[in-house]
Amino acid sequence: MSPNWCTCVCVAGLLAVSQASLAADKAPSLDEAMAQIKTYKFGESRRALSAVEEAVLRAGPAAEARDRLAARLGALLAADATLDCKRFVCRQLATLGSAQSVPVLAPLLLDEKLSDMARFALESIPGAAAGEALARAIDKSSGAIRIGLINSLGDRKDSAAALVLASLLNAGDAANVEAAIVALGKVGGDKASAALAERKSSVPAAIRFALMDAYLRCGDSFMKQGEPAKALPIYEAAFATGEPVLIRVAAIKGLVTVKGDKSLPLVLSQLEDPQPEMQSAALRLVRGMPGEAVTQALVDRLAKFPPERQSLLLGVLADRADQSALPAVVGALQSQSGEVRIAALTALGGLAGKRAVSLLAQAAADKSGAEQEAARSSLARLKGANVDAAILASLNDKNASAREELARAVGMRNIAGAVKVLLQTARDSQPAVRVASLESLAALAGESDVAALVEMLVQGQSDAERRQAGQAVVAVARRSSKPDSQIDAPLSALGKAGDPAIKAQLLRVVGEIGGPRAAQAAEAALRDGDAQVRDAAVRALVASGDASALPQLWQIAKSGEGEQQQVALQGYIRLLDAPSPRKSAETVAAYAQAFALAKRIEEKRQVLFGVQKLRSSEAIKFVVPLLTDKELGFDAARVIIRQTDPGRRAQAARAGSPDQMSREEAIAALKRVLETTEDSRVRQRVQMMLESETYR
Amino acid sequence: MKLNQHISRRQFVKNVAAISAPFIIPAMALGRDARPAPSNRITMGFIGIGGMGGGLLRSFLEHADAQVVAVCDVDSERRLAAKTLVEEKYAGQSAANRYKGCADYNDFREVIARADIDAVCIATPDHWHALPVLAAAKAGKDIYCEKPLGLTVAEGRVMSDTVRRYGRVFQTGSQLPSTPHVLHGCELVRNGRLGKIHTIYASCGAGPSVGLQPEMPIPEGFDYELWLGPAPWVPYTKLRCHGEFRWNLDYSGGQITDHGAHYCDIAQRGLGTELTGPVEYEGQGDFPTDGLYNTATRFKVECTYPSGVKLICTDEGRGGTTFVGSEGTLYIGDGAIDTEPRHLAHSVIGPNEIRLYNSPDHHQDFLDCIKSRKDPIAPIEWAHRAASIGHIGNMAMQLGRKLRWNPETERFVNDSEADRMLSRSMRSPWHL
């Protein structure tokens, strides 16, 4: 999920404390830090802790140095140190500790307040001593501490723990037994799997799933270790009738991994299992099983299934990409079920080659809705060296609707060298074929085709054709390495055009290409006698993205009427954001003018969010009074948070272009937000900003 | 149906074992516009309804083939607001203008124990991703879970193995590849439009820090013990929880695992290395030495793939992924792609070139894959590999030395000290 605005601000460093200021206070030496951490309590400075942590992380591989530091830390566990200190030390020993740390950690395992953190360390410490300490503590413990110890033995994955854990399978309450079961699953290996197998027949129903899950985990571990012979009996046992369906689902996956092709009959039989979960698992498995025999087996079953399962099976056949399924897929096009026909059309895109070109073009032409979409999509996806040639050769099909579909597919498939043919089909007798050809030309035409496309625009027989030809010109310009030079042909045509509809389309093209020449041409067209052309000229001025259009747009925004006035005002506000040599104060003044003129909340909000990028004294002075505006107050608060963001402030200073807003002005604005805003999230953000190093 | 607030472990397991998943009719059989009959909708429970979870809830409420039946959060204010949102939404669609079918829960285990729920959406803090995912997978639920996948590399590995063991459909909240510009950008890279790629920048943004925070009373209606869950116990303070979890290493990994999960995922897709990753990591980071937060504020980690391609994860630059190749540069951000030369962005990818999975709607893709049982666009193993880059990047910065990584074994090469940081112990009774 994309971050929302609050997160965005935070991400940008809303709360950023100046690290430079933190670094200004000299970090304590290790000796000083070791002495200081002894009395540490949560909420106090972490400086000493950080110094120790740094030493632990950078201790290096030399055992002697590591042990020396670990011993100093371990001494704190036996000393009269605070609870928070001891918790911290345990964390460090998780990274640094060795067998020599075990004696100081072991007694803490039975301490209600430190047991978890002692395990934190002992779980990570290599060697038998740590595991033995955990195991020894089990007998002396109960409740959550005991469960934690069993969990830790499992997480160490130490095969030596298997016997201890196995002994727990028949002792204690269900929670303890279950913890031991789970731990054995993690440890894996011969002893663990044997213990689980033995307990399998007598485990209470409530923890049977946990046991089978652990048992399967042992099987998976054997597979990872390259011992399929040991995994096989586990999967076979788990697949037995009567086991929970999910266990059987996992088991059949394991069986396929061990047996490969030989498991096909078993998997196929599960396609007809009464339990949907098992059917789904079988579908998933056959998708990845290679071989024509598998495909044939699936094809043989296709007609026997009800329509909803046929469509799923057709999806599987498509994913398998085995062309031997093609006849069955084509046959499914005749199904009475629309769902099956859609699935078959979709499958053809992945399976078929040039032979399906006519079939899919015809389907796309004849069908509607989801079937038409499926046929079009498949026509665009068909693979194979000769597919493109087949499509180009079929462009003279007698059926105009099929020609239209094929012409559209040419662009979707990015067929190289097809422009010449498309320029011909763009003159087809049927309007739909012409428009589809122009759509494809938008994807494929090059700079050398611009003149021809402009000519098609001028000669277009309908608005749709003219619009599509124009879009093709714009698309070429956007792809071009010299986009500005693509404006020559449409500008020249604009100079000669007389028909207002053609002029309007050309202005749209010129505006979309953009730049100062586009703005100039649009400005000239503002004086045209035809309203349609004048309207297009205003929009082209806006689209040009050129700051030279600002004065003219401002005039129209001030004195224009209706939609044209609205377009001009929105465009003016938008263009104020375009690169310009204006000073920030001038830009803010222009935004303020626009704000004063705006009658609708949309434009006022547009101004506000334009100003938010300006981090100057003038900009914040413009926004602060809006905090009390009934409709805009919340937005104004958001803008101020962005303008005063400490992270951005620091970043700007580092980049050598510091904000043109003093720290005091920023603080005053943030305090004003607190005075005027009730929104709890905004208030929390602002309070945190004011607590940050930048503004404290 | 609302279960007792304190469900027993035994009851939970019993319910899980009794699962009977409905056979769901594909949406295309029903037409996109028509709302399927209630019995054919995918029933969903939402676990974690903060900023991200709330957004996901609102999105799935708009999908006709999903039916939200449960919401869960340890903050009662949030879950009740979510329940109201759901019920008001569905009431507006009912003839009687009334709807009371969304239960609210404090404990995620109660959601997962419901046999009538097909799928869960998990948007908890990162330290609370693994446990609900594992429980949901073992209960036969399909799962949508926010990124980054887990809190550690070890968590990600267990999550991926378990989800795949039980054949669950899993979609990660890495939604960017479900946008046309990201798909197109990655296809441009995969088809060599930029020439030979040599460097990729994942610009994740700087992280914050904050001053010392005092212990505070736990707000009424907030189950802080459950919020902490498997993480080490510490006293409550406001800026530890909710949206601020991301800046504390006990609950998250900071920007490199947050935005990094998105941008490294895109880097992996561009390179075609979704199932593996870099083999060397080296970097520096500024970790606050005081105050409450402790994730890196500024950072730069250089990750090297076996091919020699460098992936630079950094706080600097325009947020997004930038591929640099011998023939050009491509920037992929949240809303657009930019190329140099510019015309590269408009290059069309043909059917005989490498085409990547196309998902026009990330959430619909999840629902569709529940029906087809295919892997969606952001499957769990890919999410695990992308998240691992951030986790290992953090470790390289913390340890201050080059780390050599084996993506096959998911262990470091001759570096037992670093291996110890791949997993973390959990507070009892929680376990992976």
Image (cartoon, grey):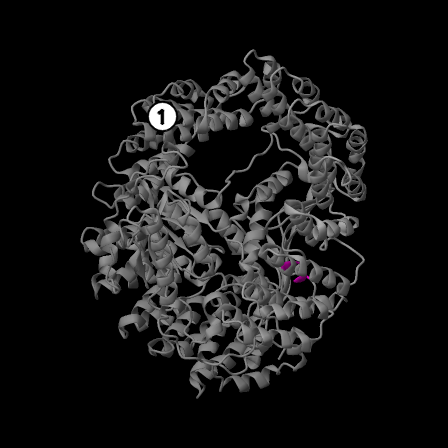
Is A464 on the left or on the right of A316, as rendered?
right
In this view of the protein, which residue sits in the foreground, A590 or A308?
A: A590
Where in the figure is residue B317, as x and y percent of width and height?
A: 68, 57
Say if A503 sits above or below B430 in the image.
above
Where in the figure is residue A622, as x and y percent of width and height?
A: 67, 67
Say if A133 sits above or below B353 in the image.
below
Where in the figure is residue A481, as x and y percent of width and height?
A: 77, 38
**Is residue A128 at least partly visible in the picture?**
yes
The residue shown at (47%, 47%) is B381
Question: In the picture, which quadrant includes the C terminus of chain A?
Answer: bottom right
In this view of the protein, which residue sits in the foreground, A275 or A445?
A: A445
The image quarter in which residue A428 lies: top right
Is A438 on the left or on the right of B293, as rendered?
right
* SS at circle 1: helix
Label 1 belongs to which residue?
A298
In this view of the protein, which residue sits in the foreground, A188 or A203?
A: A203
Residue sitting farthest toward the bottom: A80
Dot 1 falls on which chain?
Answer: A
The residue shown at (76%, 54%) is A579
Where in the figure is residue A650, as x and y percent of width and height?
A: 68, 69
**Is residue A439 at least partly visible in the picture?**
no
The image quarter in which residue A412 lies: top right
Magenta span dominant secondary structure: helix
Q: Is residue B139 magenta?
A: no
Is A169 on the left or on the right of A56, as rendered?
left
Identify residue type, mark 1. Leu
Q: What range of the chain is rendered magenta? A: A609-613
The residue shown at (30%, 38%) is B23
In this view of the protein, which residue sits in the foreground, B162 or A644?
A: A644
